[in-house]
Image (spheres, rainbow, N blue to C red):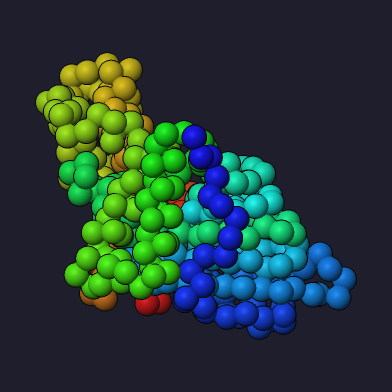
Amino acid sequence: MQTALPNRERLVEHPLFRSQNLDETRDLVAKVFCAHRLATADKDGQINAVHNRVDLGRIALNYLDYGSEVQITPGELNSFYLVQIPLSGEAEIRCGDESIMSNSRLASVPNPIRKLDMTWRANNPQLLVHINRSVLEEQLEKITGRSLTVPVQFDLGMDLTTPQAQSWLNLVETLCSDAENNGLSLNPGIRRQYEDLVITGLLYAHHHNYSEMLDCGAELTMPRNIRKAVQLCIDSPDLPLTLSELASSTGVSIRSLQAGFKQYTGLSPMEFLKQNRLARVHDELLNPDSDFASVAEVAFYWGFNHLGRFAAAYKARYGELPSQTLRT
């Protein structure tokens, strides 16, 4: 079974730029991804960068080769997922407190709400699948029929040797070949179906924090007691609810409550409650007619008594600090 894509330049008919200038390369890459720091291991700062790209709208295919060992520090990606597939060589990927050595058999899928820092070794061209975060999460909501309470978080390393990953990789390779030949994937009436296949395929091919929910499918029917507890968290997140109070109010044991929430929402009861409180804070901060005078006042009202932890949780959910939301 083929376990790696052939090492050749992709998307040659769709060049974005070629450059031997480090600053120019950084600025041009930033325009299509995000601001980042770029440094080279070469003391003279020599690179020979090639970037080809096809933007289909909700996803984009990229071939990127720096031609030298580089360190890339974008911080948090926030608004997009990036599947990074080395065609040769290795890359050290550090995301949050995780680290992997990526190669042609192990792609990387960084968590967009964790700080990212990477070292691409020399001779490490990569095929990058750039997916809009909100589009991917909306697709998952359509598949499961449930609203997401936390962002989709993939495992950092994607084993490309599994049958599921191989199938997805073949799909990406087919799409690249079609785009290279200016085929049907570039037709506005057809490309959305290609995009859906790539996004849905990734959700099934690579493990993430909602994979168990996907595996269960739509056949799950939430028990009445668990549904009552979930609804209480949604309807009354301002109440000072505890785990014991949730359990007693719905007539189940704490253990059963925790197991039910994990099975049907993917979260613990208190994490589910926290995410609903964060959503209420977010709505309030966006409301120009709000009666609250400050971020702290809103946070305290919705049950957040530690402002530092609240701000960190809010940024993890929405990609910005609550003060930034308030200013928009």
Q: In the displayed structure, would residue 276 be above or below residue 176?
A: above
Task: Kindly identify the residue that appears in the image at 49 percent across and 35 percent down.
Answer: 1
Q: Is residue 96 visible?
A: no
Please tell me in which quadrant of the rendered image residue 97 appears: top right
Where in the figure is residue 104, as x and y percent of width and height? 60, 46
Task: Work out whether 193 lies above or below 49.
Answer: above
- Image vertical order of residue 233 relative to residue 119, above or below: above
Task: Determine the residue positioned at 17% across, 28% down.
Answer: 220
Can residue 18 be seen? yes
**Quadrant containing the C terminus in the rendered view:** bottom left
Q: Which of 11/116 is in front?
A: 11
Give the residue at x 22% y 41%: 144
Q: Which residue appears at 39% of the width and 70% of the height?
A: 181
Q: Is residue 123 left or right of residue 61?
A: right
Q: How many marks?
A: 0
Q: Nearer the viewer, residue 308 or 70?
A: 70
Instruction: Look at the picture and state if 7 lies above or below 289.
Output: above
Task: Give 76 or 82, whichever is nearer the viewer.
Answer: 82
Image location of residue 281, percent across then percent down = 32, 58
Locate residue 218, reporting x and y percent: 17, 34
Residue 18 position, x and y percent, is 62, 80
